[in-house]
Image (cartoon, rainbow, N blue to C red):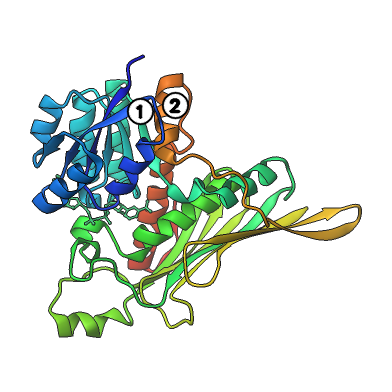
C-alpha cells in the first residue's frame, strides 16, 4: 500500500497532529490548511510540506487526501467533516466531536454513508500512565467499579481570552466542553464506557463575569461546571471543570475510580502535564498500594493509531461513537444546568 496522503486543517493543536502522523511511516502529511496566512507559511516551512491551502474546497479538490485531521474551532467540526467524507477521506477529529450531539450524529451518519472512519483525538488516553492503568483495570484489578470522580479545574486560564473559546456559538460551551471532555472520556474509557441513564449538572460564571464586563470581550459560556452521571448499571461518576476557580494549583487534573477489589488515581504532578498513576488493590487479604514509578513504554499517539487502524483494517482505539456518547452527556449536563432538573439520557 502506498503511504496514505494526510491533510491537517487548523494549525493550532494541528501542529501535534503533524508531529503525530510523522511517527508512522505508512503516511505522509502532504497538505496543510488554515485561514491564517502566517501560521500556514510558518508551519509548511518548518515541516517542509508543499501543499498550502487557505480554503478547504481547494484542499479537497486538489490534494487527493486519504485522511484529514480537523483541528478548527468546534462549530466547524461538523461542516468540515461532512466535506471531508464527501471527498472520500477518513477523518480524525479533535475533541469535542462537535458543539451538539445532533451535529455529532450527522457526522457519524456521513462517515457511514461514505464508508469512512471517524476517529477522535482523545489525547489523554494515549499516555503511558493511562495505558498502564487501563491494562490493570481490564485485567480485573479493580473488580467492579462503582464510583468515580474526574476533574480538571484551572485556577485562572481562559484559552485565547477574547477569542472563539468563550463564544457559545463557536465553542458549544466553556470548560465543561473544553477540559471536562478529556477527563470525562478518560474516566468512561477506564470504566468501559457504561451506558448512562441520568445526569445532573450546574454551571457558574462567578469569576469571569466582571473581567468580561471590563474588557468588552464577548464571553457567553460558563467558567465553572460540575455534574454527576448515573449509569444504568448503578455506577456513578462526578465531574468538575473550570477555567477559573479559587484553588492553589494552576491546573488540577485528577481521576479516581473506586471498585470492589481496588481503586485508582490518575493525577497531574504539581502544576503541569506530567502525571502519576497509583493503584490500591486487594491481594492475599491485604490492601497494597502500587505506584507506577517507571512510566510504561509511551504508547503511540492517536494519529499513529489512526493510520495503523486504516492500514490494518482494525478499530481505532478512540472511535467517533465514543465521541458522540461524551457529547450526549455534555449536552445533557448543559440542559440540566439550564433547567435545574436532572436529565434522562434517551
Ligand atoms: N486534544 C487536545 O489536547 C486539544 C488541545 C487544544 C485544542 N484542542 C481542540 O482543537 C481544536 C482547535 O483548537 P486550537 O486550540 O488549536 O484553536 P486555535 O484557535 O489555536 O486554532 C484553530 C485554527 O483553525 C483555523 N481555522 C478556523 N477556521 C478555519 C477554516 N474554515 N479553515 C481552515 N482553518 C480554519 C484558525 O485560523 C486557527 O489557526 C478545538 O476543537 C479544540 O477543542 C484539543
Sequence-wise, the earlier of marks 1 and 2 is 1
Image quadrant assignment for residue 288: bottom right
Q: Residue at x 42, y 52 (%)?
A: 329
Q: Nearer the viewer, residue 315 or 105?
A: 315
Q: Nearer the viewer, residue 117 or 294?
A: 294
Task: Give SS at disc 1.
Answer: loop
- Mark 2, ligand 1, within 8 Å: the answer is no
Q: Nearer the viewer, residue 325 or 142?
A: 142
**Mark 1, residue position:** 117
Quick check: 294 left or right of 338?
Answer: right
Q: Residue at x 31, y 70 (%)?
A: 222
Q: Is residue 6 visible?
A: yes
Quick check: 244 left or right of 285?
Answer: left
Q: Residue at x 34, y 50 (%)?
A: 96
- Mark 2 is surrounded, within 10 Å at the Cα level, by few (under 14), some (14 to 19) or many (20 or more) other residues, namely some
Q: Nearer the viewer, residue 321 or 87?
A: 87
* Image quadrant in which the N terminus is located: top left
Task: Give SS at disc 2.
Answer: helix
x and y percentages locating residue 193 in the rendered image: 54, 44
**Mark 2, residue position:** 309
Establish if 112 lies above or below 40.
above
x and y percentages locating residue 228 in the rendered image: 51, 62
Quick check: 342 left or right of 209?
Answer: right
Image quadrant assignment for residue 159: bottom left
Amino acid at each position: 500500500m502506498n503511504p496514505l496522503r494526510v491533510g491537517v486543517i487548523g494549525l493550532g493543536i494541528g501542529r501535534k497532529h503533524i508531529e503525530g502522523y510523522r511517527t508512522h511511516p505508512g503516511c505522509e502529511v502532504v497538505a496543510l490548511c488554515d485561514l491564517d496566512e502566517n501560521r500556514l507559511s510558518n508551519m509548511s516551512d518548518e515541516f517542509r510540506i508543499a501543499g498550502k491551502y487557505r480554503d478547504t474546497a481547494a484542499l479537497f479538490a486538489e490534494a487527493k487526501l486519504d485522511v484529514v485531521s480537523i483541528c478548527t474551532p468546534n462549530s466547524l467540526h461538523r461542516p468540515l467533516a461532512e466535506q471531508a467524507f464527501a471527498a472520500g477521506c477518513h477523518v480524525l477529529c479533535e475533541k469535542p466531536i462537535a458543539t451538539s450531539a445532533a451535529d455529532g450524529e450527522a457526522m457519524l451518519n456521513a462517515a457511514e454513508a461514505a464508508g469512512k472512519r471517524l476517529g477522535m483525538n482523545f489525547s489523554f488516553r494515549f499516555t503511558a500512565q493511562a495505558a498502564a492503568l487501563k491494562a490493570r483495570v481490564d485485567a480485573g484489578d479493580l473488580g467492579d467499579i462503582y464510583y468515580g470522580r474526574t476533574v480538571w479545574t484551572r485556577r485562572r486560564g481562559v484559552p485565547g481570552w477574547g477569542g472563539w473559546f468563550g463564544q457559545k456559538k463557536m465553542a458549544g460551551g466553556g470548560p465543561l466542553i473544553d477540559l471536562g471532555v478529556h477527563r470525562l472520556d478518560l474516566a468512561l474509557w477506564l470504566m468501559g464506557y457504561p451506558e448512562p441513564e441520568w445526569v445532573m449538572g450546574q454551571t457558574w460564571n462567578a469569576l469571569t463575569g466582571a473581567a468580561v464586563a471590563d474588557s468588552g470581550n464577548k464571553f457567553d459560556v460558563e467558567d465553572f461546571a460540575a455534574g454527576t452521571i448515573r449509569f444504568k448499571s448503578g455506577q456513578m461518576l462526578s465531574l468538575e471543570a473550570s477555567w477559573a476557580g479559587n484553588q492553589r494549583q494552576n491546573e488540577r487534573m485528577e481521576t479516581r475510580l473506586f471498585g470492589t477489589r481496588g481503586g485508582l488515581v490518575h493525577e497531574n504532578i504539581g502544576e503541569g502535564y506530567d502525571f502519576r498513576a497509583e493503584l490500591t488493590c486487594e491481594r492475599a487479604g491485604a490492601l497494597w498500594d502500587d505506584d507506577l514509578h517507571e512510566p510504561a513504554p509511551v504508547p503511540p499517539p492517536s494519529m499513529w493509531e489512526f493510520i495503523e487502524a486504516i492500514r490494518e483494517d482494525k478499530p481505532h482505539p478512540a472511535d467517533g461513537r465514543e465521541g458522540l456518547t461524551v457529547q450526549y452527556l455534555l449536552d445533557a449536563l448543559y440542559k440540566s444546568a439550564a433547567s435545574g432538573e436532572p436529565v434522562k439520557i434517551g
